[in-house]
Image (spheres, coloured by chain):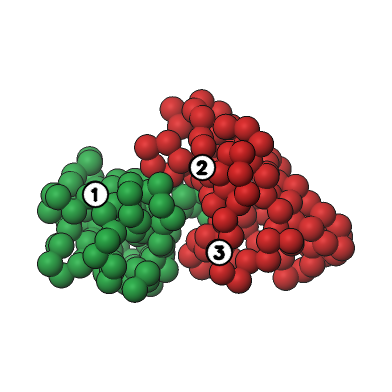
Chain colours: A green, B red
Amino acid sequence: QQQVKQSPQSLIVQKGGISIINCAYENTAFDYFPWYQQFPGKGPALLIAIRPDVSEKKEGRFTISFNKSAKQFSLHIMDSQPGDSATYFCAASMNTGFQKLVFGTGTRLLVSP
Amino acid sequence: GAVVSQHPSRVICKSGTSVKIECRSLDFQATTMFWYRQFPKQSLMLMATSNEGSKATYEQGVEKDKFLINHASLTLSTLTVTSAHPEDSSFYICSAFRDTQYFGPGTRLTVL
């Protein structure tokens, strides 16, 4: 019940295209859903996060869509750029991350020039 | 704001020695810090939650006597890998909680 399932495992998108990564969870007590971007050899950096009281949040080219009834959330990267090539992790926690984060398995995104 | 640093960034040690990794919140105070471990091409695995002034809470399967955590101040937590062995080689990442968890840049540990 503590798992967060993430797909796809890897993704190749052409420059300018839309990258979509999906996550699903079981624990309805989760109330904080962040997405992290990680470059090789670096720590993860918070990209964008959402709470279940809204269905969508947009920050620049990054959008989270949240479906509470389906217990699913997704990250959309619009106008994908080669610099977006990285590993993306979804996560979930209770109490805004003060509680431990449960991470998805990660998606390796490659944006081709 | 919300910068977290780790030191060292890379360390190579011989089997049987101990290694200390520092995690600092540079511009904020953090009563709670977290330590993660990440193997190549895998996700982050939480090892322990570190609370200032109290004992760390370890996740199931993590040896508390092998991975010693000390959170002596509101800006510093340390992870000591005792009697390190090659299987302890990994990428260790800390995070510090303010309004959310902010992650450090990680420490690559290689045990020969």
Q: Quadrant of the N terminus of chain A?
A: bottom left
Farthest residue, direction front: B54
Q: Residues within 10 Å of mark 1 (few under 14, many from 20)?
A: many
Mark 1 residue type: Ile
Marks 1 and 2 sit apart, C-alpha to C-alpha, by 22 Å
Q: Is residue B19 above or below residue B86?
A: above
The quadrant in which residue B26 appears is top right
State the residue position of label 1: A50
Q: Nearer the viewer, residue A72 or A7?
A: A72
Q: Are marks 3 and 2 on the same chain?
A: yes
The quadrant in which residue B6 appears is top right
Question: What residue appears at the point 62 percent right and 32 percent down from the top-left corner?
Answer: B73
Q: How many marks?
A: 3
State the residue position of label 2: B32
- Letter of the chain that mark 2 sits on in the rendering: B
The quadrant in which residue B1 appears is top left
Q: Earlier in the sequence, mark 3 or mark 2?
A: 2
State the residue position of label 3: B59
* Secondary structure under the numbered disc 3 in the rendered image: loop
Percent position of residue A15, x then y: 28, 55
* Secondary structure under the numbered disc 2 in the rendered image: strand
Mark 2 residue type: Thr
Which callout, 1 or 2, points to the residue nearer the camera?
A: 2
The reply to whether discs 1 and 2 touch (Cβ–Cβ < 8 Å) is no
Residue B108 visible? The answer is: yes
Residue A10 visible? The answer is: no
